[in-house]
Image: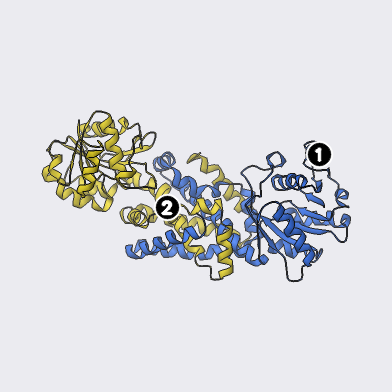
Chain colours: A blue, B yellow
Amino acid sequence: MRIGIVGLGLIGGSMAIDLKALGHRVLGVSRRGETCELAIARGIVDAASPDFGVLAEAELVVLCTPLGAIASTLEKLLPHLDRSAILTDVGSTKVSVVETVVPRWPNFVGGHPMAGTAESGLEAAFAGLFVDRPYVLTPLEETPQRAIAVVEEMARSLQSRVYFCSPTHHDQAVAWISHLPVMVSASLIAACMQEFDPKVLELAQQLASSGFRDTSRVGGGNPELGVMMAQFNRGALGRSLRVYRQQLDQLIEQIDQEDWSELEHRLSLTQQARPKFVE
Amino acid sequence: MRIGIVGLGLIGGSMAIDLKALGHRVLGVSRRGETCELAIARGIVDAASPDFGVLAEAELVVLCTPLGAIASTLEKLLPHLDRSAILTDVGSTKVSVVETVVPRWPNFVGGHPMAGTAESGLEAAFAGLFVDRPYVLTPLEETPQRAIAVVEEMARSLQSRVYFCSPTHHDQAVAWISHLPVMVSASLIAACMQEFDPKVLELAQQLASSGFRDTSRVGGGNPELGVMMAQFNRGALGRSLRVYRQQLDQLIEQIDQEDWSELEHRLSLTQQARPKFVE
């Protein structure tokens, strides 16, 4: 198959590596000419260019640009696309992407491969990034069956665990397990920064250990990514944040009231619930 | 030196192993006769008994019981203690312990070795648990210098990093970096459990990955430990929780208002601040 990849970063680059190894003809687009040259030189793609014309022969095109660039990328891409071409993306939220793309290109299946590293860019790309990772597909009822089948087969060929759900369900699920943790974790760091006694702050910094390290990790990450989550998943994240605040308020109330048996009950429930999410 | 250890669990047992290896005569007390026998059989202590009389010859006694048992342990211990004996503890909060012990035994230095594993009990004890770990000492102005010197030397002999501060400063610092993270993390799990759409909940459980794993880890821990933190550090933890809620509210407000530049500023500050606490 002839597969186009728009955006040759960590995700797009890693996908290109795997798809080329599987025998597909891989065509890349990157804004930067240097990145295109590097991708060609390393044999990551068969051809690459900043010009979307390189995708004219593509049967399947994967949009691997940041969420904020999807709309503008679409403008540039669609005039070059074959009418039968199938389109998918890798964005971490789906409602807004699907709403943007489907009216203009019905042959589209929203996708979200849940893989990554702390690194970014083509230099960080590697074979097998998607192996055993979830890959969520969010077709609509009206999405052509062939488009779904082609994108599903591509995702499975990367050895991902493929899940199907509606864009809305996807966005609420990732709000809970990915976007809410970032906001909760960032607020922990922000709260500690409010300590006005320099002795206490210094001591806290000296004593911080694995508990603080783990709980604060995702809150200390890339600010642009955090903003993007909020921007493109505002509804679901807002709902999660409100439920979270309610739970926090209940916990504060239990501590204020010295209601230790209720607090212990609450913490027993969270202890029991966690293994249903992660080992 | 003749050193008594009350409570032969992970902390007390590991301390006994190291102190005996350093050439001290180590005397253990455990409620359970079996634990005493095991400690003797393994050569972890020189003598051990459920009877506090075994500590009559001790020059230094380390209370390694849970925080909730300190007061009752004191009742049983003090009648057997030599008048010149120095007392210390390993509790994870210090104001309440110091207030309980000092009026009855001025020769006391509050201590908090910040080491541990997910395991507990004497079986989990091992040599070197305290190496390179923080060990906070919280003497008062009126604490006898000799008591401070003896406890400090003991802590340093375990190769811990020794810090001195007031009990109040200690409790506020650990509220920030240890107790607040537990409540923040538990509330994350509690919030996710509120999802009423079973499809979304199942999807969230399937998709949860490293971000959720790390952020939820300490909130899925031992409920009794969590309650103990709240019980014995209610003031400082309550203050931290209120500051946290304020920060969370500001973040929610920024998302509601779609104030992306302020949200990005906030997340940039947390990204910059985290390395001051942990690498």
The image position of residue A229, as x and y in percent, is: 63, 56
Three-letter amino acid code of the residue under disc 1: Ile
Residue for badge 1: A40
Three-letter amino acid code of the residue under disc 2: Leu
Quarter of the image with the N terminus of chain B is top left
Q: Is residue B259 visible?
A: no
User: Horizontally, is B262 left or right of A144 in the view?
Assistant: left
User: Which is more toward the observer, A259 or B44?
Assistant: B44
User: Horizontally, is A7 left or right of B231 in the view?
Assistant: right
Residue for badge 2: B180
User: Which is more toward the observer, B169 or A135?
Assistant: A135
Instruction: Name the residue at 75% across, 55% down.
Output: A70
Number of the front mark, 1 or 2: 1
Using a 10 Å C-alpha cutoff, classify the residue at mark 1 as few (fewer than 14 neighbours), some (14 to 19) or many (20 or more).
Answer: some
The image position of residue A45, as x and y in percent, is: 80, 43
Alpha carbons under labels 1 and 2: distance apart? 50 Å
User: Horizontally, is A176 left or right of A107 in the view?
Assistant: left
Q: Is residue B146 visible?
A: yes
Q: Residue furthest top?
A: B23
SS state under label 1: helix
Residue A78 picture quarter: bottom right
Q: Chain of mark 1?
A: A
Using a 10 Å C-alpha cutoff, classify the residue at mark 2 as few (fewer than 14 neighbours), some (14 to 19) or many (20 or more).
Answer: many
